[in-house]
Amino acid sequence: MDAHPHADAYSEATDADRALRLTLLYHPNVRRVGAHAALDALADGGEVELARDILGFTPAPGDGVTPADGGATLGDPFISSLPICLRGCDHGGVSIARNDSRTRVRAGDVEIDDIHEVRADALDEGVVLELSERIVLLLHRVPALPPPPADLPDFDLTGHSVVLDQLRRRLWLALESGAPVLLRGGAGTGKERIARAAHKTLFGDARPFVHADLGAMPPSLARAELFGAATDTARHQPGHVQKAHGGTLFVDRVHRAPSEVQVLLLRLVETGAIDAIGGHASTPSEKIDVRLIAATREMTTERDDVLLQHLTAHEIRLPTLRERRDDIPMLLLHFLRVILEGAGQADRLRLPTPSASPWLPARVVARLCRYNWPGNVEELRSVARRLMVRSRGLPNVEIDPELDETLRADGGGEGHSVLSARYLDPGHHATPLPDQLDRLRDDEGRIKERDLWEALKNRLRGKK
């Protein structure tokens, strides 16, 4: 595989200069979502004007915007033609002045009547701006990097944030190396989805993709599950490693590997070989051609085993959704579109006329974009479903009282996941399945409600 251009720039992205940007989080014409405008003039204390037909936005890739759609400016009839003024401040912040504009402006929870100043540290995380309850923008500071090459795989990731493009670049460079890859990220960041997308990018659908979750395997059976075993009838039962031959082996929660499994995985990584099933000292090793992708939520410490330390040579940290806030609306629209298409209602996201009231209100998007998403993408997917259930039969999307309380309680801190009510804390419920519960727990010791119900149903059916 040939290396893509800009590889050095992306590998040094953490040290790059940062630039101010306005990203379009919501527009009644949802194809405009993801467009952005550079605010380079603010770096030197200059000004930028924002109005209905002032300030051009670079379209997001694939948005299909044409001049007939309103062009590169906001173009919404409810936005005033008199400009709002953005001005760079000496300490790195930005002041927002309404001046004579009739556009209503809200920065976070603050309604701006005259002038509002945004601190420099707030720009790193991003400040959500609402304009006349029609447009939602993100005023933020991003790494100043060249645009990604057109042939960079998207790895089935929704969004066009700089952070996500950095992830795509690092993943592609790691895959080009041919070495094992370690994905490190919190719950809901999409580790399995990215591993599957990486496999499809490399091999298409022709070769096997095998998912081995060490967190779901009893430690005493992990070796046999992964590397196979000889049965009582002298037949050989292949393991996940043999089944993945010629394709990809995705080892999830690799930090839970027992010591003997770590030794065998390390040998596979270093030599491409494993012991033949049922073999002995005179039995030759079995060669395995497999691309290994591992995943973990744990941080590396001095007490980590050699396997995890070895895998960190090509470690890729998956960003939280809070770190890619400008991707939230694109993900939300993606989830809603999938649900709507399944119900034959895809046209609900289309705006019939420029002055019509959109089915998805800007205020809903703004509130979701201000939330910190401790459950990451999976939490957002769950919220999209909740919005659809709540809004069934209504003219517009509405937030239910429980979600409203969660969004209010977040307050810009770490947040309380709206999925937390769907988890069972350790010790909270008595259970007839004590021997199976440890297999169901995540890395924080919690058990998903759906997994518990499935285990209970299996017990009632006589399954183990």
Image: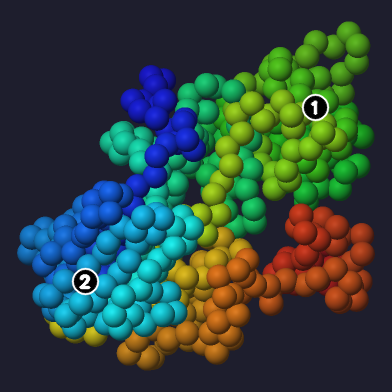
Q: Amino acid at mark 2?
A: Ile
Q: Residue at x 70, y 22 (%)?
A: 269
| SS for dot 2 | strand
Instruction: Determine which residue is flagged by label 1.
Output: 306
Instruction: Determine which residue is flagged by label 2.
Output: 84
Mark sitting on residue 363: none
Above or below — where is 345 with respect to 238? below
Above or below — where is 460 with respect to 311? below
Classify residue 362 as left or right of residue 109: left
Residue 261: horizontal and vertical position, in percent? 83, 32
Q: Nearer the viewer, residue 281 or 98?
A: 98
Q: Residue at x 43, y 74 (%)?
A: 108
Q: Amino acid at mark 1?
A: Val
How many discs appear?
2
Can residue 39 be seen in the rendering of this structure? no
Q: Nearer the viewer, residue 296 or 12?
A: 12
Residue 329: horizontal and vertical position, in percent? 39, 65
Residue sticking out furthest to the left: 68
Q: Tell which circle, 2 or 1, labels the residue nearer the N-terminal end.
A: 2
Above or below — where is 218 with respect to 281? below
Residue sticking out furthest to the top: 282
Residue 351: horizontal and vertical position, in percent? 21, 77
- C-alpha gap between disc 2 and disc 1: 57 Å
2 vs 1, front mark: 2
| SS for dot 1 | helix
The quadrant of the image that shows the C terminus is bottom right
The quadrant of the image that shows the N terminus is top left
Classify residue 420 as left or right of residue 83: right
Q: Residue at x 51, y 28 (%)?
A: 175
Can residue 240 be seen in the rendering of this structure? yes
Badge 1: how crowded within 10 Å, few (<14), some, or many (20+)? few
